[in-house]
Amino acid sequence: MRRLILFRHGKSDWDADFRSDHERPLNGRGARSARLMGKLLAKTGETPTLVLSSTAVRATSTAQAAIKAGNWDVEYRQDHSLYGASPSSMLEYIRALPDRHGSVMLVGHEPTWSGLVSAFTGAHARVPTASMVGMRFSSARWVDVRFDGGELLWLLKPRLFEHFPL
């Protein structure tokens, strides 16, 4: 059994001083939402053992804030190939994940995340900023994961939990 969590970066700051889209930072709400989602995932006991983040500033900031706020015991790495990826390139990326990690989180961007949810599960869910999507695959190895082979477990949006103390 394989579990995949897609985590979209938090809201970004369009008014900040940045030279490229890759350097765009989180705004205050984006940072708060990332911390909230980190705590929420820790409370559910669904934290992954590996987190791979796009190298875009807003994605790495989201991942790091969630990991720290939730006090996750996790291996964390950044990978530029998650920035600007397509669903088909992500399928190949996921198939190459190490099997020692049965639960993996990818932190990245739209429209790729919504496209992946649709391709893996058939669900046409939009993934808002700072939201997490949990999916399960019956595959014993990552290399056997395929489109239409996933089950949508949950879609957690930060706005649903903003008023609950975690």
Image (cartoon, rainbow, N blue to C red):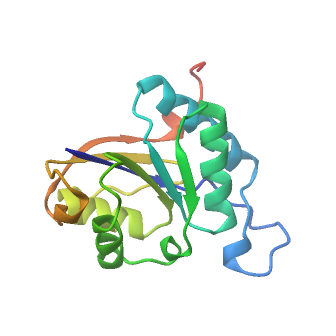
Q: Position of residue 86 (x, y in %)?
A: 38, 78
Please indicate, yes or no, whether residue 33 appears anywhere in the rendered image: no
Residue extending farthest right: 17
Residue in view at x 15 percent, y 52 percent: 139
Image check: 101 left or right of 43? left
Does residue 118 lie above or below 23 as drawn?
above
Q: Position of residue 157 (x, y in %)?
A: 47, 41
Q: In the rendered image, which quarter contains the N terminus?
A: top left
Does residue 77 lie above or below 80 as drawn?
above
Q: In the rendered image, which quarter contains the C terminus?
A: top right
Residue extending farthest top: 165
Q: Position of residue 121 (x, y in %)?
A: 19, 56
Residue in view at x 29 percent, y 54 percent: 99
Image check: 153 left or right of 46? left
Please indicate, yes or no, whether residue 26 appears anywhere in the rendered image: yes
Say which quarter of the image contains residue 23: bottom right
Residue extending farthest front: 100
Q: Position of residue 77 (x, y in %)?
A: 56, 58
Who is closer to the viewer here, 161 or 134? 134
Residue in view at x 44 percent, y 46 percent: 132
Image check: 150 left or right of 112? left
Residue in view at x 22 percent, y 65 percent: 143
Who is closer to the viewer here, 29 or 44? 44
In the rendered picture of this protein, how many numbered marks are placed on residues? 0
Say which quarter of the image contains residue 61: bottom right
Image check: 64 left or right of 16? left
Does residue 55 lie above or below 166 as drawn?
below
Does residue 114 lie above or below 67 as drawn?
below
